Image (tube, rainbow, N blue to C red):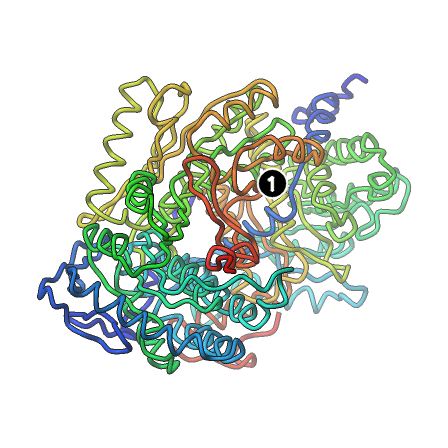
Amino acid sequence: MGNIKTSDVSIEWSSVLEMVHESRIDSVGLNERVSSLATRSIKKDSKLEALNMIVSMCDLTTLEGEDTEGKISQMVAKAIKPNPLDNSVPSVAAVCVYPSLVGIAKEKVQNSNVKVAAVSSYFPSGQVPMESKLLDTKYAIDSGADEIDIVINRKAFLEGDYRKVYDEIVALKEVCQDVHLKTILEVGDLKTYENIRKASLISLAAGSDFIKTSTGKLSVGSSRQACYVMLKSVLDFESETGIKAGIKVAGGIRDAKDAIRYLVMINEEMGSDWLNPELFRFGASSLLDDVLKQIKKLKTGAYQAGYYFPRG
Amino acid sequence: MIDWQYSESIESSDILSIKKKYSNYIGGKFVEPKSKKYINSISPSTEEVLSKVPLSNKQDINSAVNSAREGLEVWSKLTPNQRSRYLFKIARLIQERSREFAVLESLDGGKPIRESRDFDLPQVAANFFYFAGWADKLDLSWATKSLKPYGVVGQIIPWNFPLLMLAWKIAPALATGNTVVLKPAETTPLTALLFAEICEQAGLPSGVVNIVTGDGSTGSLIVNHKDINKIAFTGSTQVGKLIQKSLAGRDVGLTLELGGKAANIVYEDAAIDQAVEGVVNGIFFNQGHVCCAGSRLLLQESIHDQFVKKLEKRMQSLRVGNPLDKNTDIGAINSKEQLDKITSLVNEGVEDGGELFQTQCELPGNGFWFRPTLFTNVQPSYSIAREEIFGPVLTTLTFRTPEEAVEIANNTEYGLSAGVWTEKGSKILWTADRLEAGVVWANTFNKFDPSSPFGGYKESGFGREGGRHGLLSYLKASS
């Protein structure tokens, strides 16, 4: 099979296949490593640094049928100034919305450095013809989205049609051009570590700028284990191609403690290059408030109630 | 790009009160040594003197053995069920005071608190719990009822896992009805002396456990004592041979757990990232002061470069430093003497032509430290490929076929442990079947459980510790 080269970064299919076939993971060993990393004790200055990093890496998200202009306005205001009483707390990285709300979000973020990300390709299921996925994505980009979050074709993946999964991402990347493409693997559907690794490598080879764990719409969201499999894939992909891709973890990360554990993992496995919103993101809605509370606690010793922090 | 440094997170040692001077624990009492001589126990991470402990002489050993003999009178008249209850009590007390023990173990021995807290202490308690359960089941465990305890057992333990080796020795000995005279290592006597407090707290009858401190000369006095019925020794092969010589021709039981130079075989079809983790754990756990450490990495030629690259990267993330910092991965080398030995073997390796890689990190000023080290381009004839280094030094050899891997793995005087890494189950079985090693770990390394027997082939010793087999090391056939 030859290469359908639709974009500069897509990697030849034969070498993708080779990498995919070498997906060997020992789950016992992996779990052990991940739990060992979770025992790191992050205190004092290093904790404050971590908490601020987490804020700057957040994609504040609302993906509901009930989303309105009012809701988006609230969220964007919070994204720009997560804690209006403490200017040292940075803005979040982006807000993440459905395509039809991109225009409104874009208008609200104005000239802040908060980006607007849109989920497209018929998020979260992706069960539509390719034409619809392309249209969905094109609409979001035309409305001004800075970043696009798509879902992989899990139907094709689970049926073993990896080529189709790859081709679809390549085609969507072509629509995106310079707009950052984050590809959601939906690890809760893939189940095994080998599947997560295969899907990671396929997505990276097809030109994704980021790979992302989950839609947040399943009961099983991100896990540190899944993130570990993905980061190893990103590193192997980098050593093969020289391309540094990012990772976004989303779904089920609710508190600062858990988020810090992700940071430790990124720090020790990938190095400080990845401790950067350009290469690591948290997709979350309720995480931010806990992080803000922890920052306050570190600075004042007082653990404040939720009503001290503005609604998003 | 942010360079995120972890702030210090020091485990407090306030919980602990270390005495300026310790005494031997003989006949249920803390007694000053008749020798009137003491040796210092220092902290290898600061070189600060922590305390001094007796340098016991012949009279001290005599009174310890005599008291163990008297203790045997009481201990052997208890019902198995009563003995079991004492052991359970000891296990629970250790759990209660585990933080105290963990801090002391890290201070006195130099191992990271993460390991003493998460590995050593849980294992210590688990061993007492496990053997407590055996004490009242011995009569039902073998087809014969003619197995009886030896009597008074002399136990000499090393400095790498001070309290855990004590547990491996004392728990099965007491469960089977023996009494003991135990000598902890010269450089790490403090947790054994704290354990003496546990024996008191548990109300253990006097003389059942006796703890005497000292150096090699003290150990030799125990071995050569005429009223000892069995010696259990864990330590170097060199000393093990001396002990065996001393006991030749005498009616004294002996088990030896000695050195190792374990092969960790990584096949090309292994889960590489997990194998890297396993190899790191295999050699850098406890600064490589592990008799079963995976000190020889055997790599299939086809994956050599890729594997070494990943391994070096992983080694670079190891954190070397203060053992009491909760984020420390590699603590201090146990003693100046050991540091000199490691340094000299590593220098020899470089002179022989080995290619050296060391983790780049800052080492603390005082204390004994050695950077995690990897040798590549090593030939099986080099001393770093043959001698036990007992430090954080990994030697890489390569192989082409499974047959060759097994041949290289077995090409050593030792045979304590080995590791096999492959995702192919049949290859694990094929390889394990041919390895001359007491333990073979598959797709993991350095895993221990009180129910699993541990011990060596060839010059790694004889006798087993742990499990039902471990009980037999403390029982002998009588008519």
The residue under the point 32% across, 70% down is B69
The residue under the point 55% across, 28% down is A239
Instruction: Please provide percent x and percent y for residue A25.
Output: 65, 40
Question: Residue B20 or A26: which is nearer the viewer?
Answer: B20
Residue located beneath label 1 in the image: B442
Instruction: Please provide percent x and percent y for residue A252.
Output: 66, 62
Q: Decide if residue B342 is in sight here.
A: yes
Q: Looking at the rendering, which quadrant does residue B242 occupy?
A: top left
Which corner quadrant holds the C terminus of chain A? bottom right
- Label 1: state its secondary structure: strand
**Measured along the vertical axis of the image, is residue B326 above or below residue A167?**
below
Outermost residue toward the left? B36
Question: Residue A164 or B462: which is nearer the viewer?
Answer: B462
Instruction: Please provide percent x and percent y for residue A151.
Output: 77, 46
Q: Is residue B432 left or right of residue B223?
A: right
The number of numbered discs placed on residues in the rendered structure image is 1
Instruction: Please provide percent x and percent y for residue B105.
Output: 32, 61
Amino acid type, residue under disc 1 in the picture: Ala
Q: Decide if residue A48 is in sight here.
A: no
Which corner quadrant holds the N terminus of chain A? top right
The residue under the point 68% across, 64% down is A72
Outermost residue toward the right? A129
The residue under the point 54% across, 43% down is B439
